[in-house]
Amino acid sequence: MNPIILLIAGLVVLIIGGEGLVRGASSIALRVKISPMVVGLTIVAFGTSAPELLVSVNAALSGSPDISMGNVVGSNIANLGLVLGLTAVISPIMITPSTLKVDWPMTMGTSLLLFLLALNTKIGLIEGLIFISILTIYTTWTIRKSRKATKALEGETIEEMPVSKSIALDILWIALGVTGLYFGSDWFVSGAVTLAKTWGISERVIGVTVIAVGTSLPELVTSVIAAIKKETDIAVGNLLGSNIFNILSILGITSLISEINISPQFISYDMIWMLGITAILLPMMLLKRDINRIEGAILLIIYSVYTYLVVIA
C-alpha cells in the first residue's frame, strides 16, 4: 500500500480508537460511581495519550527508536509552537495562576529531567520507573488538589461525560478502541518508516515532523475550535499538561517495555529546541498574564524555523 495512504489511514484509525477507548472506559467508571473529575484526570488523560503511546511502543519494538523519541519531543514542540501559537493568533489566551505556579514549572522540570536522563543516549528500565513514579505522584496530587478546589465542577463534568445506555455498549467501545489503536499504530509506524526510506530521510526527521504533528492533531483541532468560540482559558494548561504526560507516561511506559536508544541529534538539537520554546513561554505569560496574537505569531515563527531547519539539515 502507498505509504502516505497507510500513514493517513493509521492516523485516522488511531484517533477513532483513542476516542472509543476514552468513551467506553469513562462510561464504565462513571457507572460504578467513580468521580467524573477523577475520570477526567486519569482515564481521559491517559486515553487521549493512547495514540502517541501505541505509536511509541510499536516503533520501539519494531526497531525504530528515533520514531518513539521523535514522536514525544516533536509533539511537545508542536504543542507549544504550532498548536498554542495558532490558538493565540485566533484568540488571545488568558493565563491562570495555576498555569504559572504548577503547569509551567512541572513542564519545564520534566523536560529538563528527560534531557539529563537522555545524556547517556538511552532511556531504559530505571529511567522508566523514575518517570512513572513522578507521574503517579503528580496525578495523585492533581486529583487531591482538584477535589479540594471545587465540588461544583463535578456536576458540570457529569453533563460533559454521559453514561451510555448499557455496559455492553461500553465494552464494545473499549474493544473497538483497543483494536483501532493496535492496527492504527501499526499502519502509522509502517507508513512512516516506508516514507522515510522512500524519501531518503531519517526516521528522526519523520518522527519530529510528520508523526509529531499527526499525533498532535486532536489537540490542534480542539484548541482551534476553543479559540473560535473564545473559550481559550484552559488552553495553555491543557497543552502543558499534555507535554508532561507525553514525557512521563509515553516514554515511561515505552521504556519499561523496550529500552529506547537515543540518537545524539535529539540531545544536541531537538531537546534544546523543546527546552527553549518552553522557557520562552514564561516571560510571555508573566508580561501581561496572557499570550496575545503577536506572541502567538512569534511561537508559530519559531516552530516554522525549527521545522525548516530539521528538514533541510
Image: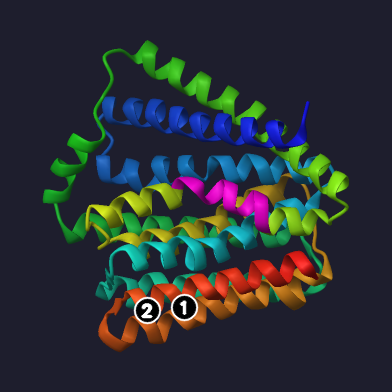
Rate crowding at label 2 as few (under 14), some (14 to 19) or many (20 or more) other CA atoms within 10 Å.
Answer: few
Q: With 283 as the anchor, is 159 left or right in this view?
A: left
Q: Residue furthest left?
A: 152
* Residue 2 highlighted magenta (yes or no): no
Please determine whether, in this image, residue 278 is positioned above or below residue 32.
below
Which numbered dot is residue 294? 2
Quadrant for residue 29, please give it.
Answer: top left
Q: CA distance from mark 1 to mark 2?
A: 6 Å
Q: Which residue is mark 1?
A: 298
Res 196 seen here: yes
Three-letter amino acid code at the position of disc 1: Ile
Please determine whether, in this image, residue 203 is positioned above or below residue 106.
above
Q: Nearer the viewer, residue 89 or 33?
A: 89
Q: Looking at the image, do the residues carrying marks 1 and 2 touch, with CB atoms under 8 Å apart? A: yes
Residue 14: image location, x then y, percent:
57, 34
Residue drawn at point x = 37 percent, y = 79 percent: 294
> Magenta segment range?
209-218
Quadrant for residue 33, please give it.
Answer: top left
